[in-house]
Amino acid sequence: MNTEFYKELIDKLNKKNVTLVAVSKTKSAEEILKLYDLGQRDFGENYVQELVEKEAQLPKDIHWHFIGHLQTNKVKLIAPFIYLIHSVDSVKLLKQINKEAKKNSRNIDCLLQVYIACEDTKFGFEENELKEIIQMNQAKQIPLEHTCIKGLMGMASFTNDLSIVKKEFNSLKLLFDQFAKKISDCPFQILSMGMSADYETAIEEGSNMVRIGSLLFGKRIYTDHS
Ligand SMILES: *Cc1c(COP(=O)(O)O)cnc(C)c1O
């Protein structure tokens, strides 16, 4: 873990009011604790099983962010403690989150993941689907007493061409601004975009929450999660 880099980064982000989610997937509890000891409290994971195991071992004041594709049948495993789910990509999932939040007598904050990349490997809503959700929400057709839609999340294309990335982030910011006025029940204020390779571009385009893994923890070595 790169302590100097972390300190510089958190300083820079604090000045810009950008929240850092340290993406700790594949990293050990010990590695997470090193960042925790420097004051970091927001951590992001994208596998349910891995998250549940880490949550059990680590301090309870950590804000756990779920950033990966979430299957509806796994929501119950994280519902008791999850802080923010960035990756809501279907109405079915939203309903399930609401149901499990209710069972746990709590509220779960969510972001809607929006498809902005020009590749078909990424999850998320298309713009027209997002509009439908807003309408359904306004018409109270989706039960959301135990969830709050707090904003949007998006992932740019995996490319070295930052002009493409910039354009994609800009399109998400425009959607965010457009919808911010329309969702009334909860403050719509989080725009989660930017990872190690493109967080600076994301911030220039209006991101206020970045999800950074490899720059903090070093490259990941993947194990089989299936
Ligand atoms: C892994 C991951 C990140 C962090 O990626 P890095 O390139 O390591 O910073 C951010 N967001 C999501 C959704 C991820 O799965």
Image (cartoon, grey):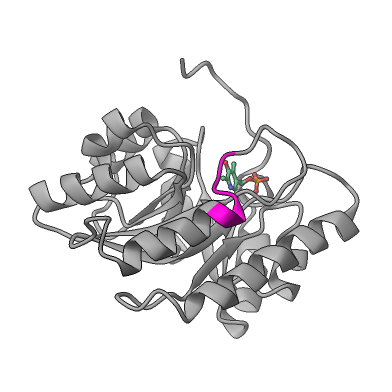
Q: Residue at x 23, y 35 (%)?
A: 77
Give me the residue at 14% from left, 58% from top: 106
| 55 or 76: nearer the viewer | 76
Q: Residue at x 62, y 26 (%)?
A: 221
Please tell me whether the stretch drawn in magenta is mainly helix, strand or loop. loop
The residue nearer to you, when weighing 52 against 68, is 68
Q: Residue at x 47, y 52 (%)?
A: 34
Nearer to me, 179 or 132: 132
State the extent of the magenta-drawn residues as a range.
Answer: 123-128
Quadrant housing residue 123: top right
Q: Position of residue 138 (x, y in %)?
A: 33, 69
Report whether 14 appears left or right of 93. Answer: right
In screen coordinates, is 185 left or right of 189?
left
- The number of callouts visible is 0
Does the magenta portion include 124? yes
Q: Quadrant of residue 70?
A: top left
* Position of 77 relative to 182 (above/below): above
In the picture, measured across the screen, residue 89 lies left or right of residue 174, that is: left
Q: Is residue 216 above or below residue 185?
A: above
When asked about the image quadrant of residue 111, the answer is bottom left
Q: Position of residue 214 (x, y in %)?
A: 66, 45
Residue 80 visible? The answer is no
- Residue 182 in percent (x, y) is at 44, 77
Q: Quadrant of ligand 1?
A: top right
Residue 138 visible somewhere in the drawing: yes
* Magenta residue check for 86: no
| 154 shown above or below 167 | above
Vertical comparison of 35 with 28: above or below: below
Residue 204 picture location, percent across and down: 75, 74
